[in-house]
Amino acid sequence: IDEPMVGLDPKSMRLVKDILSRRAEEKTTIVMSTHTLTLAEEISHRIGIIHKGRLIRQGTVQEIKNQARESEKLEDIFLKMTEEDL
């Protein structure tokens, strides 16, 4: 699923999030591409972080936090991992 929340109103976002969460609880594999990292952190069991077309990290949210030695939000970790000099 590519960017499942783009263009949705809050009610529809909740519906999609609930559906994805239920499917994940049923052990269904869902591959989702999103820039909404709070969504990924909230409903994903495992995540991969892609930067410039390369997979740079993968694992559970907690594993990625441990690898980054951070207890911050996934969004903050992503920004630190992919920051570049301007």
Image (spheres, rainbow, N blue to C red):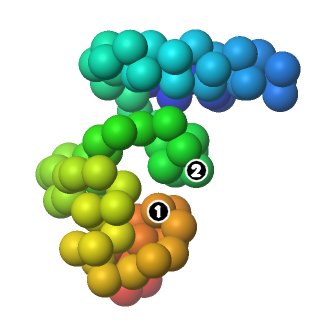
Q: Position of residue 47 (x, y in %)?
A: 31, 45
Q: Is residue 64 left or right of residue 20?
A: left
Mark 1 and mark 2 lie on one chain; the one further toward the N terminus is 2
Q: Is residue 73 left or right of residue 9?
A: left
Q: Secondary structure at mark 2?
A: helix
Tell me if residue 17 can be seen: yes
Tell me, yes or no, whether the two marked residues, 1 and 2, touch with CB atoms within 8 Å. Answer: yes
Instruction: Return the residue found at the far front.
Output: 26
Q: Is residue 11 left or right of residue 14?
A: right
Towards the viewer: 76 or 70: 70
* Disc 1 from disc 2: Cα separation: 7 Å
Mark 1 belongs to which amino acid? Leu
Q: Secondary structure at mark 1?
A: helix
What residue appears at the point 58 percent right and 50 percent down from the top-left corner?
38
- Quadrant hosting residue 7: top right
Name the residue that disc number 1 marks.
74
Q: Residues within 10 Å of mark 1 (few under 14, many from 20)?
A: many
Q: Position of residue 26 (x, y in %)?
A: 38, 14
Q: Residues within 10 Å of mark 2 (few under 14, many from 20)?
A: few
As drawn, 48 above or below 74 = above
Label for residue 38?
2
Label for residue 28?
none
Towards the viewer: 84 or 40: 40
- Quadrant hosting residue 70: bottom left
